[in-house]
Image (cartoon, rainbow, N blue to C red):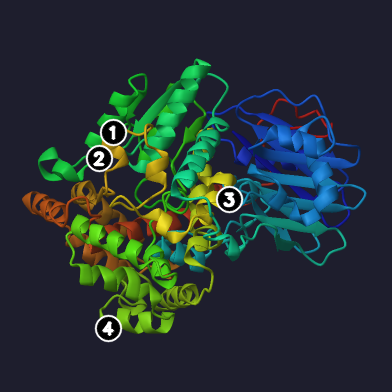
């Protein structure tokens, strides 16, 4: 794993290594010992913080240039052939000279990049199209522009005040993710994915430029048939997994039993076996008793994977790690300890990469409601009827209801959908999350939903242009950084995504199942039980039992938040307390878990008011801790740790 950072002084003064060391120190957890590679050039200073201790490249960028990059290329040979230079840093400079601010659109891979030109007195920051590698910045007019992989590199080193952003935190709770650019801090912004930030000393301020913008005309453009599409998808996914694996040793892979994580895990295991390495499959099994879960659980799917790949090392990490320490950059909302358990498992086996299936739902295994509406628009009536008939049988829902839900509703204009939702009690005003927000924050949430409903982008593109996916990638990256762990997302490989967007809507349904052609592509790779399993499991059954056990502790925490002006500017604490008090205990909690399990075989259980209240309590607690976090205040007397390479002022090489 690698983190980067730096700053440019706008007052003409020289950058200093001590400020770079302070930023690196703020991003380094106490137990980690990365190598720092800093460099300064006039008013600009950049650094790389290498947790894997990989050897520095023998090359260096041309004179007058600085380059720092958190970079993994999809096609390094093609990159080397296309741009001049003997090392990645020089080639990135060549790319800037050729493409300017459009360079993130030309670079295939996962990356966050910082490039400074002494001649042009200009800085470029760039981020990959999916936001896999994080990059945040803060700006002080006339003083500096500072940037780092993690917000703590900015507020922890005194470049930012670290004051919470109430509107961003309210929307993070309400929507479940940060809006594009939001960080939770009032004066720190994440560079949006697929964008470039350009800053010259003579500019009035930094400019964000969207370099990657998918063309809506690419949707549905595949013309080579379903089977050919499945074969090409199989090839691209296999290649995407392979290029993200280490040359040897161990790698971790999340394994939920679902289509996406199972495919990634098996493909990784096959490849690592050929390399003499090992895959550690990490699951977080639901703690609910088997007598309640029955066939709603995912245990039988994980067992099928392990039977297919007996050389996998399997670990059930749920509850294995102690509570995760407070991280100011990560608003905690329920799964923090589980994530820490994965990191602990990875470190135990010497792995510093965790593979995930994140992105499959938006790309190759897409199953959005708009698929059926698109089939109606394009006149694919036979395909539509067969797909909806199979779906109605599968879910036990009348065909007429399936048509209303999957075809008619998506075809209605946003205004009509809004009216219907409000009549049925599902509109913005009736969203139960709003009950726990103060009136001003309710209005912010209401305006956010209204703006989202008015977006004209095709639904299949929104996953890659509206921020939710990037927010999830960013959160994993930030959480992993605290343990020196990097996350890899093969299903967010750009070539996989581009192919998935090109498939026509009717390619995504067939054989009585949705999520095609991914299922066809995985024929012979996934066990048939997993490949044809039609349901997606939700752990809400076990969540109810966990909530029951945590009820008293949550109430104690909430009582302690009463009177906290900063917290109560966002959250309605009495409202949260009232719902938490109603959480059932003992036999009543078991009875509720049984009712959720009986809601439908394999169907995702409803998110109850109790789960929403827990999320609100978690976010409120985080906000309170943020307000008193000592590192948020600049400390001029702070002595950062000494990093190896601090005396090295040569240009950074990758």
Q: Is residue 328 visible?
A: no
Cα separation between marks 2 and 4: 36 Å
Task: Answer with mark 1 or mark 3, whichever residue precedes in sequence.
Answer: 3
**C-alpha separation, residue under disc 1 versus residue under disc 3:** 29 Å
Query: As drawn, is 53 to the left or to the right of 322?
Result: right
Instruction: Please tell me whether mark 1 sits on a helix, a strand or a loop.
Output: helix
Label 4 to label 3, Cα distance in Å?
38 Å
Select label 3 or label 2 by which is in front: 2
Where residue 330 appears, as percent x and y from the top left, is: 48, 50
CA gap, disc 2 to disc 1? 6 Å
**Which residue, given by chain and number where applicable, does mark 4 sit on?**
423
Q: Please name whichever residue, 156 or 608, is drawn nearer the observer in this view of the structure.
A: 608
Q: Position of residue 341 (x, y in %)?
A: 37, 34
* Residue at left offset 52%, top offset 18%: 275
Residue 131's disc is 3
SS for callout 4: helix
Q: Residue at label 2?
A: 298
Please tell me how crowded label 1 is: few (under 14), some (14-19), or many (20+) other residues with Cα within 10 Å.
many
Mark 3 and mark 2 lie on one chain; the one further toward the N terminus is 3
Badge 3 crowding class, 10 Å Cα cut-off, few under 14, some 14 to 19, many 20 or more, is many
Disc 2 crowd, CA 10 A, few/some/many (<14, 14-19, 20+): many
Q: Which mark is residue 302?
A: 1
211 in relation to 266, above or below: below
């Amino acid at each position: 794993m690698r983190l980067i950072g730096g700053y440019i002084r706008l007052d003409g003064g020289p950058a200093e290594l001590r400020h770079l060391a302070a930023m690196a120190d703020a991003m380094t957890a106490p137990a980690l010992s990365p190598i720092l590679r800093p460099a300064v050039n006039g008013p600009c200073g950049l650094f790389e913080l290498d947790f894997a201790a990989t050897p520095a490249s023998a090359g260096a960028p041309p004179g007058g240039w600085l380059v720092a990059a958190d970079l993994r290329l999809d096609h390094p040979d093609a990159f080397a052939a296309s741009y001049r230079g003997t090392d990645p840093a020089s080639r990135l400079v060549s790319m800037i000279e050729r493409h300017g601010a459009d360079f993130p659109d030309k670079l295939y891979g996962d990356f966050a990049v910082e490039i400074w030109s002494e001649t042009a007195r200009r800085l470029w920051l760039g981020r990959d199209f999916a936001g896999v590698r994080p990059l945040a910045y803060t700006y002080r007019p006339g003083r500096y522009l500072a940037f780092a992989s993690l917000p703590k590199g900015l507020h922890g080193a005194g470049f930012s005040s670290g004051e919470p952003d109430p509107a961003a935190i309210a929307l993070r709770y309400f929507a479940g993710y940060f809006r594009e650019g939001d960080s939770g801090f009032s004066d720190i912004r994440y560079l949006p994915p697929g964008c470039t930030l350009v800053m010259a000393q003579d500019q009035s301020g930094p400019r964000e430029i969207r370099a990657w913008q998918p063309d809506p005309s690419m949707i549905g453009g595949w013309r080579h048939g379903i089977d050919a599409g499945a074969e090409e998808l199989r090839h691209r996914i296999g290649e995407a997994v392979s290029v993200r694996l280490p040359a040897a040793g161990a790698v971790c892979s999340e394994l939920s039993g679902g289509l996406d994580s199972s495919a990634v895990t098996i493909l990784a295991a096959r490849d690592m076996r050929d390399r003499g390495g090992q895959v550690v499959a990490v699951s977080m099994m639901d703690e609910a008793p088997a007598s309640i879960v029955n066939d709603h659980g995912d245990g039988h799917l994980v067992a099928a994977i392990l039977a297919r790949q007996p050389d996998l090392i399997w670990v059930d990490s749920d509850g294995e790690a102690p509570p995760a320490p407070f991280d100011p950059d990560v608003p905690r909302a329920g799964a923090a300890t589980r994530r820490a358990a994965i990191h602990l498992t990875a470190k135990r086996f010497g792995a510093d990469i965790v593979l995930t299936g994140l992105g499959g739902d938006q790309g190759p295994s897409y199953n959005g409601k708009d698929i059926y509406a698109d089939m109606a628009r394009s006149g694919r009536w036979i395909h539509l009827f067969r797909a909806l008939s199979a779906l109605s049988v599968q879910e036990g829902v009348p065909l007429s209801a399936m048509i209303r839900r999957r075809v008619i509703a998506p075809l209605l204009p946003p205004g009509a959908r809004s009216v219907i939702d409000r009549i049925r009690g599902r509109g913005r005003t009736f969203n139960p999350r709003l009950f726990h927000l103060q009136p001003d924050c309710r209005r912010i949430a209401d305006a956010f939903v209204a703006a989202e409903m008015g977006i004209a982008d095709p639904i299949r593109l929104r996953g890659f242009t509206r921020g939710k996916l990037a927010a999830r990638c960013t959160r994993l990256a930030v959480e992993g950084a605290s343990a020196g762990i990097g996350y890899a997302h093969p299903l967010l490989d750009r070539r996989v995504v581009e192919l998935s967007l090109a498939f026509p809507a009717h390619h995504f349904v067939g054989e009585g199942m949705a999520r095609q052609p991914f299922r066809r592509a995985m024929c012979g790779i996934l066990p048939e039980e997993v490949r044809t399993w039609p349901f997606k499991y939700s752990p809400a059954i076990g969540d109810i039992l966990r909530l029951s056990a945590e009820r008293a502790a949550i109430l104690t925490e909430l009582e302690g938040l009463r009177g906290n002006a900063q917290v109560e500017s966002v959250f309605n604490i009495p409202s949260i307390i009232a719902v938490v008090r109603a959480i059932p205990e003992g036999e009543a909690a078991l009875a509720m878990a049984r009712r959720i399990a009986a809601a439908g075989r394999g169907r995702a259980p409803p998110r109850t008011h109790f789960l929403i209240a827990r999320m609100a309590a978690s976010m409120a607690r985080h906000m309170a801790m943020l307000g008193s976090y000592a590192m948020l205040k600049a400390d001029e007397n702070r002595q950062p740790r000494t990093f190896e390479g601090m005396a090295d002022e040569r240009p950074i090489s990758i």
